[in-house]
Image (cartoon, helix red, strand yellow):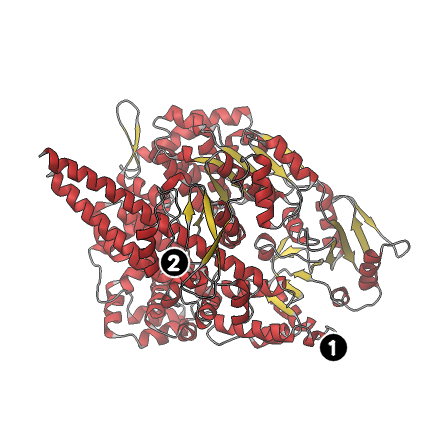
Amino acid sequence: MEEESLQELLNFIETIDHSLLKENSLDSVNNVKQDYDIRSPAPKRSKTLGIAYTRGSVRNCNLTSSPSKLAFDELNVSSSQELNEDVVINEFLKIKEIPNLYPWQKKCLEIVQNKNCVLSIPTSGGKTLVGEILIVKEIRLKEKSAIFILPYISLVHEKYQSLAKAAEELDFFLEEYAGVKGQYPPTKRQKNKKSIYICTIEKASKLVGSLIQENRIDEIGLIVIDEFHMLNEPSRGPILECVVSKVLYLKPNIQIFTMSATIGNIHALSTFIQGMTYIENSRPTKHSEYINIGNRIFQSFDGRTVKEIFADNLSESSSEIFRACVSTKSEAILNLVRGNVMLLIFCPSKMTCNNLAVRLQFERFPGTKEYKKQEKEDLIEALREENEGKLCANLEACIRYGVAYHHADLTLGERRLIEEAYLASTLQILCCTSTLAAGVNLPAQRVIIRDPYVGREFISLNMYKQMVGRAGRTGLQESGESIVLCKTMYDFTRFTAMMNEGPEPITSHMDPPTIVDLILEVVAANLCSKLEDLKLLVKHTLFYQLKNKEDQQEFLETTLPTLVNSLLASKGTMLTQDTDGILKLTSVATAAVAAGLSHDISLIVYSDLVQNKASFCLLNSLHMLFLVIPLEYRIPSDGILLARNKVYDRYSKFHPQTLAVAESLGVTENLVALNVTGKLKEEKKALLCRFFHACVLYDILNLDNHARVVKLYGIQNSHLQQFLNSTSYFASKVYRFCEELPELWCYKQLLTDLPQTLMYCRAPSLRALLDLPGVKIGRARQLLAAGYSSLELIARADAMEMVSKIRHLPLRTARGLISAAKLHFITEMDKVESMKALIQSLEKNYEGIVKNK
C-alpha cells in the first residue's frame, strides 16, 4: 500500500513538473532543467537563456548580436573582498546609482542596528532608502529573508521594479504579494537563497500567518513597513496592527522597522513595537509652503507657524508666487501655471480635475504645443492602445499642450502611461485627486492645492503633508514650493488652525469584529490555545496599550471572554473548546482563515454556497460567476450603477440558456420589469444587482469586444476594470475557502481557474506579459507588436533597442521590464530545481522500499 501511494505521489509530482514547464511555454526552461546544476562549482549555462550560476553569484544578462546566444558578465562584486556592512551598502548604492547617503541616514543605520524602530521624517526625506538598505543587509549579512509591507498595489509594483536590478545582481529573489499573486506558505528556495516578499497589507497578514502556522517564521529576519500611519485607516489599519501584534507576541528574532511622515504620538507607536524612535525634521531639498486668501499670501516657516508676507524683501521664488496671487483679479492658479515648471495641481473632485485641465490648455505659452510634439503623439497612441482604440477628446487635446488629468475614472493602464509621461517631462502639468499623493512617486517643482478639500471633507494634515511632499524631490530639484488656495476666510482660518495644531495622533481602529478575526487567526496558527493566551496576545496590540488601566482591565476580564463565548455559542460554526479549555477552530473557521475572509463574511459565503449547491445550474458559467460577486457589488448603492433601461434591454436579448439560469436564481421578467418602474423591494433589488453584475462578467468572458460590454450596460471602462480586479481577488478567496471544506468539493473543481481567467480576460493571449509588475494591457500590446512576445525575449532584450521600437516607453521603464523578466526566469528555474530535488528524494525513498521488500 505504501509503495502504491509513493508511486502515485511520484507520478503526480512529475505531472506538476511538466505542467510547470508547459505553463511557461519556453523550451529554454527545459534546457535549464537539464543544464542548471547548483551543486556544481563550475557554472552551467542554459542553452537559450545563457544564465550562468556559481556559488554566491548571479550573472548579469547583456544582449549579443544573436538573440539565441547571450553574453553574461559576472557581477560577483564581493568575491575580492570579505562581505561587511560597508561593502554591502556600497554595492547597493552603486546598483541604485546613488552617490552617497545623507548624514542622517548614516546615523540612523548606525543607531538602529537590530532594534525595532519608528522612523519619522517629512515626505521625500529619504526614509525608504534606509529601509531598503536594512533589507539588503539582512539578506547579505544575516542570510535571512525580509518582508516589505506597502499600502497599495501600485506601490508594490513600483517597489518590485526599483529593486529588480539589485535582486538580479545580488542574487536574491523578489516575490510579489498583491492582488491575486502570492503563495501560502511561500516556496522554499534552493541553495537556501533568500527572498524579499513585497506585500500589500492584506497579503502580508496572510503571509505571516502561513509562516507561523508552518513553523517557518524564523526564515524572516526583518519586516519593513512603509506608511506606518496607515494604522489610522479604519478599514485596513486593524489588519496591519494584527500583523505587528502577532509577531511581537511570538517574540521571534525579527526586527520591525517602520517608516512614516510626521506622527503626533510617535512615542506611543515605538512603545507598541517595543522599540525606539528616530525623528528627522529636515528635508534634503528646500521647501517653501504658502497659503493664499484673496489678495493676501502667507508662508509657513516651520510647518506650523503661519505668517503673512509682503512684496518687500522676498526671495525670487516667493516674489513670483506673490505676484501670481495678487497682481491680477483673475484666478491665481492661471498665473501660477505660467512658466516651464513641473506642476501637480490637487483638486477636490474628478470633475474639477477635468474642467481645470481643459481650461489650462488655453493658458499655456504658444510654443508649448511644439515641445516634445512627437512624444505627445506617442503618448496619445499608447493611451488609445490601452483603451481599445478610444480616447477622451478632451484628454487628447490637453496632452498636446503638456497637460493631463489623473484620477480614478482612468484605468490603471491609462494612469500608468500618464505617470510615465510626466516623469519623462512629456507632460508638465497634472491635475489630480488626492489618490495620487498616497500612490506612486511623482515629483514636482510646484504643488498647487486647488481647494483644501478631499471630496466634501476638509483636508487632513497628513494628506496635506503627502501632497506638498511631492514638491522638491531629492535628486530632481534643488528646491520646491507649494501653495494652498483658500476661497473663503472660513477655509483659511480652519486650515491655519490645523497647521498650528500639529500632526495628528495615531489611534487604533480595532473593534470587536476585528478582534474576533484576530482570535481565529492566532488559534489557527497555534499561537494561542486558551483564553489566558489570548489575554497575553491582546496586551501586544496598540488597541490595548492606548486604553487607560481601568478600560484595559475591563477588556481582559469582561469583553474578551464575552467575544470568545460568542464564538463558542455560534452553534459550532467557528470555535470549539474541550474540557481542558483548549480552543480549536471548526472546519468553517479554518477555511475562513485560510481564505483571508473575516468571520462574518465567511458565514455569508458559506451559507450562500451551501444554499446554491442544491440547485446549481451548469448550462453555462453564469451561475458560477453569480457566486463570486464581491459583497460590495451586491448592494445597488455600492456597486456599478447599472441603468434600469440597460438592464431591461439586456434581459430581453438573453439566450434561452441564460434565461434558464436567471429563472433558477429567481430573476424573472416580471422582476426586471418592476425594476424599470422603481417599485422593487430592497431584497429583490439586491438580487437583481448581483445577477446583472454576474451578467457583466459573463459578457466580458464571451464577447471579444469589451467596448461592447461598456456600451451594453452603460458603465465606465475604469469602473469595469476595478470590478474585474475586485471579483478576481474575491474569487481567489472563495476558491481557497472551498478548497478547505470537503462538503464544497464541487465548487473547488469549478473555481480552479476562475480568478486568473477574470484577471486576464481582457487579453488572455497576453497573460505572460501582463504578469510583469506594472504592465497593463496597452503596454503588453505594444511589447507584442514590437516582437517581444514572451518574457524570454524581454529578458534578453537591450533597453535602448526596446525604447526605439516602442512608442512612449521611457528608458527607465524599459530597464525595469528587462530586470523583472530576468528575475522571473531565475524564479522559475528555482521552482524546477525544487521539483527535481523533491522527485530525486522520493525516488530514493521508493527504491529503498522496493529494495527492502
Q: Nearer the viewer, residue 679 or 766?
A: 766
Is residue 244 toward the left or the right of residue 603 in the image? right
Q: From the image, state whether disc 2 or disc 1 is nearer to you.
A: 1
Q: Nearer the viewer, residue 615 or 790?
A: 790
Query: Within the image, what quadrant is residue 804 found in?
Result: bottom right
Locate the C terminus by quadrant: top left
Q: Nearer the viewer, residue 395 or 563?
A: 395
Query: Within the image, what quadrant is residue 218 found in?
Result: top left
Q: Going by the picture, which residue comes out furthest to the left?
A: 853
Kindly identify which numbered label has been placed on residue 75: none
Q: Residue at x 50, y 64 (%)?
A: 413
Is residue 790 toward the left or the right of residue 415 in the image? left
| Residue 596 percent across, percent down from the top left | 37, 45
Taking 361 as reference, is 298 above or below it? above
Q: Secondary structure at mark 1?
A: helix
Query: Within the image, what quadrant is residue 265 found in?
Result: top right
Q: Earlier in the sequence, mark 2 or mark 1?
A: 1
